[in-house]
Image (cartoon, rainbow, N blue to C red):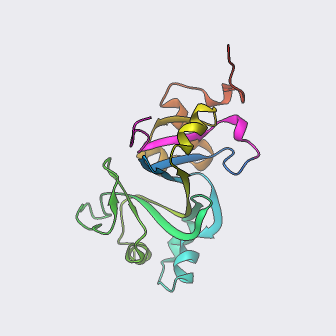
């Protein structure tokens, strides 16, 4: 696979990963280079709300954030917070996120503490997903896992990330390919 080919793609954990760390997950790939890949799982919630995370970090937080989940982004750097967010702010501006990495598709990624503080004050991006930790693969590792039928890839979608219930994200992402994911077998056939 060419460098960057998987950036902005979803990784859908194939049924043969059930019972493993990544079983029944969908991961959004933020980066893919010859050195490896980095992404965030977008459907596995932690027991923590954004209100609790912000309060723990010493920021003021609106009680409405008690309902905003924090996700488990992956097993790497699980104490590090990541914000996957839209490029547009709540007031429609697009010039507020200079500390965020532009993912070139209307989405941005940030680890900036000031963005978390702004979320607590209801001044952040229009859409966002907060994750602790990330999923990472070394050079060639993800490509090999795809060859071994561990992952199905499909185009990433902000709608799936921000507007679909967690338990439906895998199904909806597979539908982007015209696939009924529940009909996929856990083992690949070889002739």
In this rendering, does residue 41 appear at all? no
Which residue occupies the extreme bottom position in the image?
A: 58
* Quarter holding residue 4: top left
Left or right of 156? Residue 101 is: left
Which residue is drawn at the image coordinates 52% and 71% (left, top)?
Answer: 65
Q: Is residue 3 above or below residue 191?
A: below
Q: Is residue 108 above or below residue 63?
A: above
Magenta span:
1-19
Residue 180 or 100: which is nearer the viewer? 100
Q: Position of residue 191 (x, y in %)?
A: 67, 13
Quarter of the N terminus within the rendering? top left
Which residue is drawn at the image coordinates 22% and 64% (left, top)?
Answer: 95
In the rendered structure, does residue 10 fall within the stretch colored magenta?
A: yes
Left or right of 138? Residue 116 is: left
Which residue is drawn at the image coordinates 51% and 71% (left, top)?
Answer: 64
Q: Position of residue 50 (x, y in %)?
A: 54, 71
* Quarter holding residue 91: bottom left
In the rendered structure, does residue 165 fall within the stretch colored magenta?
A: no
Left or right of 17? Residue 161 is: left
Q: Position of residue 107 (x, y in %)?
A: 36, 53
In this rendering, does residue 170 appear at all? yes
Which residue is drawn at the image coordinates 34% and 60% (left, top)?
Answer: 101
Which residue occupies the extreme right position in the image?
A: 19
Residue 88 or 40: which is nearer the viewer? 40
Q: Is residue 180 above or below residue 69?
A: above
- How many labels, in total? 0
Left or right of 52? Residue 110 is: left
Q: Position of residue 36 (x, y in %)?
A: 48, 50
């Amino acid at each position: 696979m060419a460098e960057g080919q998987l950036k902005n793609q979803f990784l859908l954990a194939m049924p043969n990963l059930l019972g493993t760390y990544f079983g029944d997950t969908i991961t959004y790939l933020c980066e893919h280079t010859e050195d490896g890949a980095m992404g965030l799982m977008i459907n596995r919630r932690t027991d923590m709300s954004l209100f609790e995370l912000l309060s723990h970090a010493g920021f003021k937080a609106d009680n409405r954030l008690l309902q905003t989940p924090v996700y488990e982004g992956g097993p790497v750097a699980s104490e590090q917070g990541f914000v996957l967010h839209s490029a547009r702010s709540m007031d429609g501006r697009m010039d507020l996120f200079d500390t965020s990495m532009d993912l070139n598709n209307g989405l941005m990624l940030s680890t900036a503490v000031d963005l978390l503080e702004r979320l607590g004050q209801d001044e952040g991006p229009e859409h966002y997903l907060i994750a602790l930790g990330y999923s990472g693969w070394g050079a060639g590792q993800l490509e090999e896992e795809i060859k071994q039928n561990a992952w199905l890839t499909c185009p990433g979608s902000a709608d799936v990330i921000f507007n679909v219930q967690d338990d439906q994200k895998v199904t909806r992402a597979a539908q982007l390919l015209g696939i009924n994911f529940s009909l996929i077998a856990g083992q690949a056939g070889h002739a």
